[in-house]
Amino acid sequence: MKINLRTALLCGNMVMLVPAMPAWAQDQSTTPVATPPTTTNQPEYGQDIIVTASRRSESIRNVPEQITALTGEDLSKRNARSLDEFVGFVPGLNIQSDTPGSNLIVVRGVTTGSQQSNAVGAYLDDVPLNSSSGFGQGQRQLSINAFDLDRIEVLSGPQGTLYGASSLGGTIRYITARPQLDRPAARLEGEVSSTDHGGTNTSGRGMINMPLVQDRLAFRASVVQQYDTGFADDPVLGLKNQGDNRVIAARASLLAQVTPDLDVQVTGLTEDIVNKGINSVDRDPITHALTPGEGTYQQSYTLPQRNDQSIKLVYGTVNLDVGFAKLTSITSYQREQLSSALDISTIYSGLFGTLLGFGPLGVNPYRDNLEVNLKKFTQEARLVSNPGRVFDWVVGVYYTDERAGTAVTVLNQGDPRGLLLGFPIFTGSIPTTYREIAGYADGTLHFTPRLDLTLGIRYSHNSQSFTESLTGLLGNPLNPNATNTIGAASKENTKTYLINPRFKVNDDVSLYVRVANGFRPGGPNYVVAGGTQEPRYQPDTLWTYEVGAKASLLDRRLQATLALYDTEWSKIQVTAVVSGVAQLTNAGDARIRGGELALSYRASHALSLNGSLSYTDAKLTTTAPPLGITYEGARLPVSPRWAFAVGADYSVDLGNGHQARLSVSDRYQGPRYSGFVGSTAVLPYRLNAFNLVDADLSVGVTTNLEVGVYAKNLLNSHGEIYGDRTNDLYVPSAPANVSLTRPRTIGLQARLKI
């Protein structure tokens, strides 16, 4: 995945559907967590499952929108610990990534590719993660490790009233497991696996929960250390298993039940991801053929690469029951850091060879060093009415203050000082700020016990500013040794709305209509002295019209959800070259129509069957001159038209309370593109369709100990998940850099509960 600022210099510049019906989760404030309908050890059919996506506890069967909830137990059973591993269990969710810290998240096709800020909001509990603007590398979503989570909730469609500006296309919520006040607990997990064409993967995880004062004060902590091997070899540099990554993460919470009506929780999180190299391979940009002399899992770079990311986060949550409502306050401070060193030799050799018109620069090694530091403070306070009234409501206020510092240096590694023709190539320092204040309100009127209507509104004001200090041939071409400093700022006010009627046919069937809109902030643009670039880009907005049905049938053995939607997207934000500099700009309109169907059937207490189907038709409805697209109907990137999944879980009672469980799933993702077809600014790469088959067998050895064996990508599919043709843009017919699904991985694991 390329970075906005890096792209500026260069230009100078799946839907993997759920293999199981969503496992519906219980409110994190209650214990224990209810066993989801899709698990094999459920004692009875149809337990009521509760989620809190609407800011109040409610059965997922009654929530009038498309929500997927994956419990911590489900994630553990499927060995899904990171975003790329659980994305396949969520209808309409897809990612595009070449490293674990470079995730472009897509819900229902709302994306223009890797050069934009994410259109999906990410939350840890009630705390928004990542930057809200492109200046803070908002397009790079860091994957939170899923160990010791209560559940993950994925909300489809715009969430612009309760979840803010960054939730243009949807929202992902990582809900942590709260400390238990009444009893101690501990858990240890370990696994080792081997990846074809790679090496050995290892992981160790631990959790401890300790009541410090019975029913009043408790502490919970978890730690993760995980190593995943890469599988791409670079014979030119003599490097093997490129793209490996190491994750070290820890989380700790202290919960105090001060009074029956007041609780206070403080949580801290740290996570570091260290990558060596890029997990990509070389392919012909058109035919997908191997580069002559290279194998299936080989790449050819001039310089070694790295990409490291980290997040440090602390937040406090206060809940107070004031009688008629519940008051919640969330205060957070986070710091994210990104450090990367990327090989841009092919691009810059082609670029400078063309600009300067002579050849000695031919194959010089060029490196792009990027450092980003984000500091983000947020404060939210909301009041949620107690349920059971004719009129339910939620009101709240939200404030964020972001400060990001971005530093970029382009070096000629063929020169001891990194210079080209005796001059620095580029050095840029860009400190930025983003502030937003918002107020929101949702109200639900219950006309009858079966018919209600929810209306919502959010008003927000944001302001942004930056100062860029540029040096070098690309930053200040008239005087490369001098520093050119330019600043810019912007302000905007935005309203978003929600209209959401719901009708309960009976206790097991509900129908809904949802009309919602969202927006993504605009902002000031990078500029060059004397240039004619656009000084700012406008916010893009969308409206989604959705109809859906949720049903629990056959004595709640059969769970079914159906959603049909039509999304109208205006002034879509894209990255394009304006007067030689890549910037965010607005490029026409788009329309996305689709549908999602998910089914889960418990044939018996031992056997569960499940399946899902998704259709996404995402196209431009206008031309897009900034992208060089001169026709209407160009397909939006990343999401396939069709995707489906099937799966089965079977358990066997071994006696004495022990079980053996076998899970098998097959996921299909259709062909899609990494960019817009017909674009002359960002050349598209057609990603081939693929299947992924996974299997897991676990056995309860004792009451507390479970061991198992698993296989991921059992058939060793070479699925293409990302393709980058930037090299081809500057050096025609240069190989595309393609990211593949992880080759067949077979592992052993053990879980011990104390």
Image: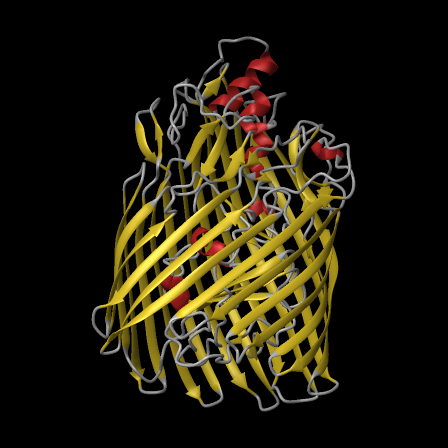
Q: Is residue 104 visible?
A: no
Task: Please identify the quadrant where the C terminus is shown.
Answer: bottom left
Q: How many marks?
A: 0
Q: Residue furthest left?
A: 702
Left or right relative to 306: residue 174: right
- The picture quadrant where one finds residue 240 is top left
Give the percent coordinates (x, y) of residue 500: 72, 71
Q: Is residue 349 visible?
A: yes
Q: Is residue 437 left or right of residue 316?
A: right
**Could you say where residue 367 lies in the image, as x and y percent from the top left?**
45, 27
Q: Is residue 236 above or below residue 15?
A: above
- Does 579 appear above or below 671? above
The percent coordinates of residue 661 (x first, y second) are 32, 65
Q: Nearer the viewer, residue 29 or 690?
A: 690
Q: Quadrant of residue 238?
A: top left
User: What residue lies at 41% left-to-right and 25% top-to-bottom?
Assistant: 301
- Figure check: 375 above or below 742: below
Residue 68 falls in image quadrant:
bottom right
Pick the residue in front: 227 or 135. 227
Q: Residue at x 31, y 54 (%)?
A: 710
**Image location (x, y in percent) of residue 344:** 48, 27
Q: In this rendering, would 576 be left or right of 405? A: right
User: Coloured how?
Assistant: secondary structure
Residue 126 to residue 390: above or below: above
In this view of the protein, which residue sits in the foreground, 723 or 434?
A: 723
